[in-house]
Image: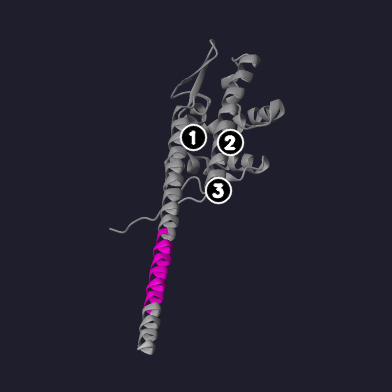
């Protein structure tokens, strides 16, 4: 009888031990799943936050690009518009204007020496600016040169943001028209090389393919 009681107690103890191990393993499994779930959710929230931040960055860039008063001169010239100059020191769009993509070499020249070289080799342009005072002509040159400098610096910023994964290739398409327009002008490409810009070679744009019909 004592032996039977001892055997029963041992079985009962082993059963309790098995149940305890089962509950322990179950608890650990649930805790592990919870930890994994928390990690996955954390990664999801992190990615969503980065995505939202990138969208905010793009919206800010696009708004600045569209509303910048200084970059508008360079953008218009790249878009084949031309400017004339009034005595009130105001630049205005003029289909017959002398300051256009044809005078980009003058705009991007270095100082008076570079401007003089361009003027002497482009007689029509030289004759067109003869009636403009030197101080006013300096004002025109500085206005247009600053506009292009700001535009090229903006493109350089895009290069940095793309390299740091803060702007996507798709989002770059918003600015592509002016990027391509600038890269298609040899005078601009020479200027960018001299001043060690990198966006013209390092911006990664989508390949445009012509679909066959």
Q: At 51% from the left edge and 29% from the top edge, which residue is drawn? A: 71
Quarter of the figure with the N terminus = bottom left
- In magenta segment, residue 196: no
- Please state which of the two labelled residues, at mark 2 or mark 3, is closer to the viewer: 3
Q: Does 143 sit above or below residue 51?
A: above
Q: Earlier in the sequence, mark 2 or mark 1?
A: 1
Which residues are the magenta region? 15-34
Disc tally is 3
Residue 149 coordinates in the image, percent (x, y): 59, 32
Gap in angstroms between the C-alphas marked 3 and 1: 28 Å
At mark 2, the secondary structure is helix
| Residue that numbered label 3 is attached to | 164
Tell whether 19 sits left or right of 185.
left
Query: Is 183 situated above or below 32?
Result: above
Left or right: residue 85 compared with residue 116: left
State which quadrant residue 115 falls in. Answer: top right
Q: Which residue is mark 1?
A: 78
Q: Which residue is mark 2?
A: 153
* Residue 130, horizontal then vertical, whole percent: 61, 18
Task: Please tell me whether mark 1 sits on a helix, a strand or a loop.
Answer: helix
Question: In the rendered structure, which disc, 2 or 3, sits on the residue that comes first in sequence?
Answer: 2
Residue closest to the eye, 63 or 19: 19
Real-space Cα separation, disc 2 to disc 1, in angstroms: 16 Å
Please provide percent x and percent y for residue 37. Answer: 40, 58
* x and y percentages locating residue 87 in the rendered image: 54, 10
Q: For the residues marked 2 and 3, what is the alpha-carbon distance in whole angstroms?
A: 17 Å
Kind of element beneath mark 3: loop
């Amino acid at each position: 009888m004592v032996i039977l009681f001892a055997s029963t107690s041992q079985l009962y103890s082993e059963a309790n031990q098995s149940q305890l191990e089962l509950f322990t393993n179950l608890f650990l499994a649930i805790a592990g799943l919870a930890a994994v779930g928390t990690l996955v959710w954390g990664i999801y929230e992190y990615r969503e936050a980065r995505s939202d931040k990138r969208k905010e960055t793009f919206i800010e860039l696009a708004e600045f690009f569209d509303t910048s008063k200084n970059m508008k001169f360079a953008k218009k010239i790249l878009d084949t518009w031309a400017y004339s100059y009034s005595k009130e020191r105001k630049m205005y769009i003029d289909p017959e204007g002398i300051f256009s993509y044809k005078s980009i070499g003058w705009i991007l020249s270095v100082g008076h020496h570079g401007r003089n070289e361009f003027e002497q080799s482009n007689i029509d342009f030289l004759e067109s600016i003869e009636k403009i005072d030197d101080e006013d002509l300096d004002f025109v040159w500085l206005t247009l040169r600053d506009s292009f400098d700001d535009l090229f610096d903006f493109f350089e910023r895009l290069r940095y943001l793309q390299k740091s994964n803060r702007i996507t290739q798709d989002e770059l398409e918003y600015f592509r028209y002016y990027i391509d327009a600038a890269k298609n002008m040899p005078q601009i490409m020479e200027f960018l090389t001299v001043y060690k810009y990198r966006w013209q070679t390092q911006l990664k744009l989508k390949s445009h393919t012509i679909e066959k019909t």
